[in-house]
């Protein structure tokens, strides 16, 4: 059966998900006396706008950073840079605020979007060096946005809970195929490929992390240990071949609309 027109393949009403999140965020801003949010952390940008992270590779994160600007009294949130296609946002061209040019571009957008507000009514969740060097309000003199984000996100809507439930169910269902394939002589890469293939079949197009399926000692005393004495997991690269009696520790992560 095909999903209803207003839902995704997991039965999630994505439009309602985004509308309810944005309203909760604005209600929290109003309750804390904040007129505008400037969000640079990718999960926060996604929460406010629905923007997806285009690259999970940390080395690319800063190069492709998008910034969201939300007015408590506004209509649509603003997205500086990033990939606005399909999102209900006011799009602004821009480059990463991790460069001086990008920070100056962001400062110009902020002057246009929230220049009427005093800096202490603007909250920012993270500053880059170039943002601070720009030296212009509200890039300096603003307040910390993280308490607002925390207060807004700590309670989940029905659609958010449905996303979490779908992500957990699909993760477990895909892992059943992995368990069925696990046997002496099988490579870790074979099991990882099985997991990634199965989540794709179940409607997931990205994995948060490479699935970890690592043979581990049966006791803490056998190690391996970190320099602080804690158990080390995972311990690095390689493609081990499983042997009879191996204890395999597993870590995998997928998301549905950004929820795991």
Image (cartoon, rainbow, N blue to C red):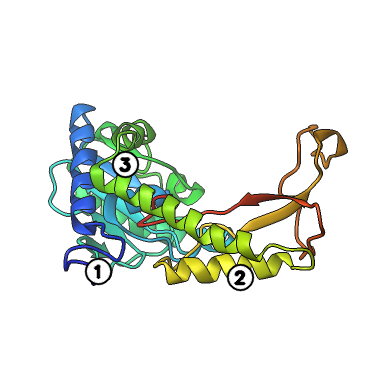
Q: Which residue is mark 1?
A: 86
Residue 158: % across, % down = 24, 43
Mark 1 burial class by Cα count in 10 Å: few <14, some 14-19, many 20+: few
The residue nearer to you, when weighing 19 against 260, is 260
Q: Is residue 115 visible in this depiction of the protein?
A: no
Image position of 21 (left or right of 164): left
Judged from the image, the secondary structure of the residue bearing numbered disc 2 is: helix
The structure residue drawn at horizontal position 17% and vertical position 64%, both measured from the top left corner, is 6
Label 3 – label 2 distance at C-alpha: 47 Å
Q: Is residue 76 above or below residue 85?
A: above
Label 1 – label 3 distance at C-alpha: 29 Å
- Which image quadrant: the N terminus? bottom left
Image position of 42 (left or right of 86): right
Label 2 – label 1 distance at C-alpha: 31 Å
Q: Is residue 223 above or below residue 198?
A: above
Image depth: mark 1 or mark 3 in front: 1
Q: Which residue is mark 3?
A: 138
Mark 3 / mark 2, whichever is N-terminal: 3
Judged from the image, the secondary structure of the residue bearing numbered disc 1 is: loop
Image depth: mark 2 or mark 1 in front: 2
The structure residue drawn at horizontal position 29% and vertical position 39%, both measured from the top left corner, is 156
């Amino acid at each position: 059966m095909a999903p209803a027109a207003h839902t995704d393949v997991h039965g999630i009403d994505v439009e309602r998900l985004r509308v309810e999140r944005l309203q909760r965020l604005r209600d929290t801003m109003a309750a804390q006396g904040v007129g505008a949010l400037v969000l640079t952390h990718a999960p926060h940008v996604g929460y406010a706008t629905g923007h997806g992270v285009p690259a999970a590779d940390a080395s690319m994160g800063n190069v492709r950073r998008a910034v969201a600007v939300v007015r408590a009294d506004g209509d649509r949130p603003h997205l500086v840079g990033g990939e606005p296609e399909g999102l209900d946002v006011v799009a602004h061209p821009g480059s990463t605020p991790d460069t001086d040019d990008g920070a100056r571009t962001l400062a110009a957008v902020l002057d246009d979007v929230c220049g009427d507000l005093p800096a202490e009514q603007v909250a920012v969740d993270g500053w880059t060096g170039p943002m601070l060097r720009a030296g212009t309000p509200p890039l300096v003199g603003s307040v910390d946005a993280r308490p607002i984000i925390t207060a807004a996100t700590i309670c989940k809507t029905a659609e958010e809970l449905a996303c979490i439930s779908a992500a957990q169910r699909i993760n477990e269902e895909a892992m059943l195929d992995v368990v069925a394939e696990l046997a002496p002589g099988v490579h870790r890469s074979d099991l990882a490929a099985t997991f990634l293939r199965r989540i794709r079949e179940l409607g997931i197009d990205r994995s948060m992390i490479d699935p970890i399926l690592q043979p581990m000692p049966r006791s803490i005393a056998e190690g391996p240990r970190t320099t602080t004495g804690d158990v080390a997991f995972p311990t690095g690269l390689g493609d081990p071949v499983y042997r009879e009696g191996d204890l395999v520790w597993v870590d995998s992560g997928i998301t549905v609309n950004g929820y795991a």
